[in-house]
Image: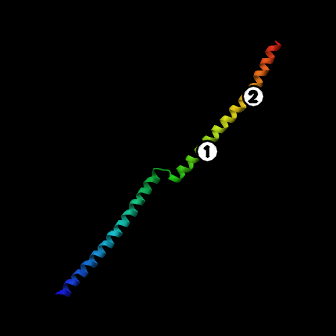
């Protein structure tokens, strides 16, 4: 009787191992299918990848900083050119 029950339990353990292996295979297949479908949908929606978004964000930040620096330079140059104009206007009004 002992040998029969051991054989039965051995067969049940083997069956459970096989079932667990099949379940893992089904899960991997499901994950792969789900990932493939998600990537296809995102491609069709023309979504931007995170890396591309971050690169463009950095480019925009640098462009804003450069724009601010150029604005300051233009303001400084305009201030320099305004001083001589005021002096020349003042001197031309004095001669009149």
Query: Who comes first in sequence, dot 2 or dot 1?
Result: 1
Q: Residue at x 71, y 29 (%)?
A: 78
Q: Residue at x 75, y 25 (%)?
A: 83
Which quarter of the image is occupied by the C terminus? top right
Viewer-side residue, 65 vs 12: 65
Q: Is residue 66 above or below residue 27?
A: above
Q: Position of residue 68 (x, y in %)?
A: 63, 37
Q: CA distance from mark 2 to mark 1?
A: 29 Å
Residue drawn at x 27%, y 75% is 16
The residue furthest right is 95
Q: Is residue 78 above or below residue 49?
A: above
Tell which of 73 and 47 is nearer to you: 73
Q: Which residue is situated farthest in the top direction here?
A: 96
Label 1 SS: helix
Count residues near mark 2 (Cα–Cα under 10 Å), then give few for <14, some for 14-19, many for 20+.
few
- Tell me where residue 25 sits by quadrant: bottom left
Mark 1, residues whose alpha carbon is within 10 Å: few (<14), some, or many (≥20)? few
Tell me the quarter of the image containing the N terminus.
Answer: bottom left
Percent x, y of residue 33: 39, 62
x, y percent for residue 48: 50, 50
Instruction: Determine whether 57 is above or below 31 in the image.
Output: above
Give the number of the disc on residue 81. 2
Residue at image mark 1: 62
Residue 85's spot in the image, x, y percent? Answer: 76, 23
Residue 57 vs 30, above or below: the answer is above
Badge 2 marks a residue whose secondary structure is helix
Task: Please tell me the numbered disc located at residue 87.
Answer: none
């Amino acid at each position: 009787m002992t040998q029969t029950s051991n054989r039965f339990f051995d067969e049940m353990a083997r069956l459970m191992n096989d079932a667990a292996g099949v379940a893992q295979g089904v899960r991997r297949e499901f994950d792969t299918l789900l990932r493939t479908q998600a990537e296809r949908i995102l491609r069709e929606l023309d979504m931007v990848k995170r890396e591309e978004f971050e690169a463009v964000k950095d480019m925009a930040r640098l462009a804003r900083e450069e724009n601010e620096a150029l604005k300051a330079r233009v303001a400084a140059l305009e201030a320099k050119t305004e001083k001589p104009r005021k002096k020349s206007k003042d001197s031309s009004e004095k001669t009149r």
